[in-house]
């Protein structure tokens, strides 16, 4: 405590005495003796700043940075206009925190409001929150939104990203919530199996579209079946795909969630990322985290405030429906800046390039002996191939500075293409694969 709080040992003892403790050990009486620290941690002694910098640079040199990336699986290599960094790095945004005091937080509140508006336009839904930590958390929070006393079973398609399923299971642990997986068939959700699982205690179905394998799901049929059973549908979606595909709102889903990393967030070795959430009017009051609304002040000027929020989420945590009372405001700002910089046509062009290049890559790989696992399925910008030499293929690509697809096991590889990949790159990938497979 003395290392971080500016007070003297004498003042600390006085504070302990005031609280009724004779020493620091009394503060930890409830902690079992077996888990208490008996000796100092094995941490090196402090070093000079220059020495630390050299050590960190040596460690960083061990990282492998690929110039050519053909891997997605939840984190995607997209072009980010320079203006996004310029705006997000402004001191006013980087240092701002909780916008509770609307009088001095209008700038931050407006950026969040703009972000929420963007998400609603992308998803076709009526309300969005100020974002959550990442796409997996957004999916898990959405599942919790749908649960009630009579319906506490969650259905998750096997075609959902395994990382998302893991977080949903973690959220459900200890809450007496059952999580069941709906089998996949030919790379998409098995609708017949889904219908059999739709019992009276099912609260929702979590579906990913495009799914983890890149395939487009039969969303309309799934929504119809789930709603007929009295449950709700959560669609986890790639935001870039929404420039071309039907929106969750058009499908009639109840909650739309997803990973916002493609909207101006660099890969950054895994974060920080951004979880977006949007819902229809019937569900919007259950949205966790912050929501910013637009209103007018006493003089008729346009203003922004936090709205539609149950205070339990912030101060009465034992009665809260969610333990999230924060948001990813800086990441949300990046998303809003990215969408503004790209504009509707630029954003659509990026989506068109993603899907057209992915289809070109799939065709070239097939010629090289790396064949599609689901040749009959429509996909956006990811697809699965089958290759008995998967390890050799990926190693050969890595040797050339190319990060190949993600190995899924069983001789399968999940590939991805974005607007960042050139025809020359894709031809080179196919040529290397052909050399390895001998096709």
Image (cartoon, helix red, strand yellow):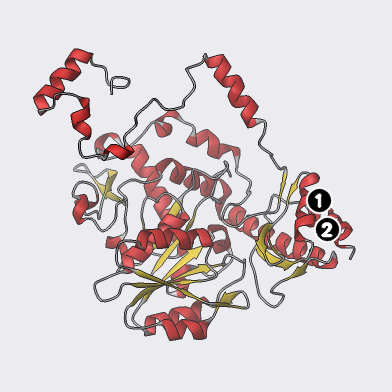
| Percent position of residue 173, x then y | 35, 61
Residue 395 in the figure: left or right of residue 117: right
Separation of marks 2 and 1 at Cα, in angstroms: 8 Å
Could you tell me residue 148's position as x and y percent?
26, 71
Give the number of the disc on residue 433: 2
Residue 60 seen in render: yes
Look at the numbered disc 1 and give the secondary structure of its residue: helix
- Local crowd size for mark 2, using a 10 Å CA cut-off: few (<14), some (14–19), many (≥20): many
Residue placed at 79% from the left, 62% from the top? 389
Question: Could one spot residue 127 in this view of the protein?
Answer: no
**Image quarter of residue 370:** bottom right
Circle 1 is placed at which residue position? 396
Q: Nearer the viewer, residue 415 or 33?
A: 33
Above or below residue 219? Residue 13 is: above
Q: Earlier in the sequence, mark 2 or mark 1?
A: 1
The answer to which of 237 and 347 lies nearer the viewer is 237
Q: Cβ–Cβ below 8 Å for labels 2 and 1?
A: yes
Is 183 on the left-hand or right-hand side of 20?
Answer: right
């Amino acid at each position: 405590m003395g290392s971080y709080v500016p007070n003297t040992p004498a003042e600390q003892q006085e504070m302990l005495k005031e609280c009724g403790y004779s020493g620091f050990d009394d503060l930890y009486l409830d902690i079992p003796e077996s888990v208490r620290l008996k000796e100092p941690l094995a941490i090196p002694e402090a070093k000079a700043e220059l020495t630390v910098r050299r050590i960190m640079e040596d460690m960083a040199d061990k990282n492998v940075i690929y110039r050519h990336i053909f891997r997605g699986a939840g984190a995607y290599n997209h072009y980010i206009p320079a203006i996004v960094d310029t705006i997000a790095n402004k001191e006013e945004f980087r240092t701002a925190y909780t916008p509770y005091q609307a009088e001095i937080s209008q700038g931050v509140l407006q950026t969040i409001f703009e972000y929420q508006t963007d998400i609603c336009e992308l998803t076709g839904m009526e309300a969005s929150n100020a974002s959550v930590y990442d796409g997996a958390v957004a999916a898990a929070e959405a599942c919790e939104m749908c649960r009630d006393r009579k319906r506490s079973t969650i259905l998750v398609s096997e075609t959902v990203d395994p990382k998302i399923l893991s977080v949903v299971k973690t959220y459900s642990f200890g809450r007496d919530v059952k999580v069941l997986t709906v089998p996949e068939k030919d790379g998409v959700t098995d609708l017949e199996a889904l219908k059999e699982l739709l019992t009276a205690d099912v609260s929702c179905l979590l579906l990913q579209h495009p799914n983890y394998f890149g395939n487009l799901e039969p969303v309309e049929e799934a929504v119809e079946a789930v709603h007929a059973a009295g449950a709700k549908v959560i669609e986890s979606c790639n935001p870039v795909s929404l420039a071309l595909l039907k929106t969750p709102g058009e499908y009639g889903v109840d909650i739309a969630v997803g990973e916002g990393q493609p909207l101006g967030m660099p890969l950054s070795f895994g974060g920080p990322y951004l979880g977006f959430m949007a819902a229809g009017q019937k569900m919007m009051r259950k949205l966790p985290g912050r929501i910013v609304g637009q209103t007018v002040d006493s003089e008729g000027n346009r203003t922004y405030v936090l709205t539609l929020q149950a205070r339990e989420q912030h101060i009465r945590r034992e009665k809260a429906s969610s333990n999230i009372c924060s948001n990813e405001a800086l990441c949300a700002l990046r998303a809003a800046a990215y969408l503004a910089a790209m504009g509707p046509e630029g954003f659509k062009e990026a989506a068109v390039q993603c899907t057209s290049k992915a289809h070109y890559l799939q065709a070239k790989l097939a010629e090289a002996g790396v064949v599609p696992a689901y040749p009959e399925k429509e996909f956006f910008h990811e697809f699965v191939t089958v290759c008995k030499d998967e390890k050799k293929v990926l190693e050969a690509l890595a040797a050339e500075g190319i990060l190949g697809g993600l190995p899924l096991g069983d001789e399968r590889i999940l590939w991805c293409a974005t607007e960042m990949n050139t025809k020359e790159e894709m031809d080179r990938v196919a040529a290397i694969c052909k050399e390895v497979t001998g096709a």
